[in-house]
Image (tube, rainbow, N blue to C red):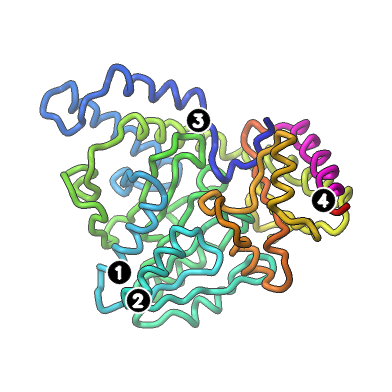
């Protein structure tokens, strides 16, 4: 198998698995227990909190562990709305993850007003559009750091500063950015940031919500006193420990990530464009994650191409894994290029830290054969 879908999920690293193992087998107590067998696990959770904070330039007390980024995204938007019930306006973009867009659609039915900002053909946001959309009724701006389908990067520092100046809360979905680009929340005045463990080699089922100190927040899940009373539910200690270890490893790799990923990604793109006619890369050439490429193959249905690639042992995707069972076109590509059928003819390839040049070459060869077969 050649796995080129790391934006969908990543394998758990051996070091991460080994860090988790004792908490499945030996240290399985409840951290909320009064006796030491359980309560001593609080220190392990605290250590993981420090590791995650180190990855994104935060304070440990600003880290809340959640079940996933979907929960984190929903919790942040709900907290912002509850901070001032008189404000019912949400600003987001047309290329957000479904956990933001679908939540905003649900909130519209409850009386909120949602502004979806457009993007240009390269997937970039116009800051002027955001500035014009802000009003005294705006409760929160929710924008993605790095797009999950194209890898396009939004200017988060500039967005955060604009929102801060206007007194509007800002939430950022940084799921794809974590471990791939530098995140320093000491410098960027973002109020809420969402992360997902399984996007940077931790297990599925654990996420993070960063809440800036003094930013308003009320629990999304009410229950016990866990997470300093901010998120009820017994802590999933093994997964939290694994997330912490993965964050520590991601921090150590960050300096070399771009240098390793970009040459492989560029080789994939260049080879495809040179060997396959009527192929086009979707997204800005420079303002993009180093591991991600989204390519349109004109005249080829993405579903059919995925089937042939799968038969060749290659894992890729037509967009977000969360929408993998959908027959519809990619909403991200459609927002970028609304004309024609481009959104139905595009595939995403996302490389990981263990991807190799020979895998890229094998993928290109399979694409050449598959596209030729489907074009007849």
Question: Relative to residue 359, is residue 335 drawn left or right?
Answer: left
Q: Do the numbered discs 2 and 1 sit on residues whose CB atoms are within 8 Å? A: yes
- Earlier sequence position, callout 2 versus callout 4: 2
Tell me residue 198's x, y (percent). Answer: 48, 39
Q: Residues within 10 Å of mark 2 (few under 14, many from 20)?
A: some
- Using the image as rendered, state which of residue 212 and residue 72 is in the foreground: 72
Residue, disc 2: 112
Residue, disc 1: 81
User: Relative to residue 220, is residue 263 depicted above or below?
Assistant: above
Residue, disc 4: 374
What number of labels is visible?
Answer: 4
Question: Relative to residue 294, is residue 244 drawn left or right?
Answer: left
Q: Which label belongs to residue 12?
A: 3
User: Relative to residue 354, is residue 63 depicted above or below?
Assistant: below
Question: Relative to residue 9, is residue 82 drawn left or right?
Answer: left
- Using the image as rendered, state which of residue 126 and residue 300 is in the foreground: 300
Q: Do the numbered discs 1 and 4 sit on residues whose CB atoms are within 8 Å? A: no
Tell me residue 230's x, y (percent). Answer: 23, 50
Could you give the CA–CA distance between mark 2 and mark 1, rounded to whole angstroms?
9 Å
Could you give the CA–CA distance between mark 4 and mark 3, rounded to whole angstroms?
35 Å
Q: Residues within 10 Å of mark 3 (few under 14, many from 20)?
A: some
Point out the stretch of residues depicted in magenta: 356-374
Residue at 65 percent of width and 44 percent of height:
350
On the rendered image, what quadrant is the N terminus found in?
top right
Tell me residue 298's x, y (percent). Answer: 80, 60
Q: Which label belongs to residue 209?
A: none
- Earlier sequence position, callout 2 versus callout 1: 1
Q: Nearer the viewer, mark 2 or mark 4?
A: 4
């Amino acid at each position: 198998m050649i796995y080129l879908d790391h934006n969908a999920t990543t394998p758990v690293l051996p070091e991460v698995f080994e860090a988790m193992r004792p908490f499945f087998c030996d240290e399985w107590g409840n951290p909320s227990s009064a006796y030491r067998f359980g309560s001593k696990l609080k220190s392990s959770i605290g250590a993981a909190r420090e590791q995650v904070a180190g990855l994104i330039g935060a304070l440990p007390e600003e880290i809340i562990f959640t079940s996933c980024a979907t929960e984190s995204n929903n919790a942040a938007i709900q907290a912002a709305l509850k901070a001032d019930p008189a404000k019912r306006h949400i600003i987001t973009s047309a290329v957000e993850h479904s956990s933001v867009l679908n939540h905003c659609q649900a909130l519209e039915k409850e009386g909120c007003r949602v502004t979806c900002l457009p993007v240009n053909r390269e997937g970039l946001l116009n800051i002027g559009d955001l500035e014009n959309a802000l009003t005294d009724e705006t409760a929160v701006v929710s924008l993605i750091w790095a797009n999950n389908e194209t890898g396009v990067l939004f200017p988060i520092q500039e967005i955060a500063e604009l929102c801060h100046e206007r007194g509007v809360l800002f939430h950022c979905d940084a799921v794809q950015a974590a471990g791939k680009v530098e995140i320093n929340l000491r410098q960027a005045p973002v109020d809420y940031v969402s992360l997902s463990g399984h996007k940077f080699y931790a297990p599925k089922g654990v996420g993070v919500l960063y809440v800036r100190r003094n930013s308003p927040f009320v629990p999304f899940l009410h229950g016990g006193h866990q997470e300093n009373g901010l998120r009820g539910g017994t802590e999933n200690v093994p997964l939290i420990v694994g997330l912490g270890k993965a964050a520590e490893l991601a921090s150590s790799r960050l300096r070399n990530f771009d240098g390793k990923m970009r040459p492989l990604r560029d080789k994939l793109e260049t080879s495809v464009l040179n060997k396959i006619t009527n192929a086009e890369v979707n997204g800005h050439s420079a303002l993009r994650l180093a591991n991600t490429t989204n390519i349109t193959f004109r005249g080829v249905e993405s579903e059919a191409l995925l089937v042939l690639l799968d038969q060749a042992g290659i894992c890729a995707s037509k967009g977000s894994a969360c929408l993998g069972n959908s027959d519809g076109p990619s909403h991200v590509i459609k927002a970028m290029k609304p004309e024609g059928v481009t959104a139905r003819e595009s595939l995403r390839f996302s490389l990981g830290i263990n991807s190799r040049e020979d895998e890229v070459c094998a993928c290109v060869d399979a694409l050449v054969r598959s596209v030729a077969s489907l074009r007849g």
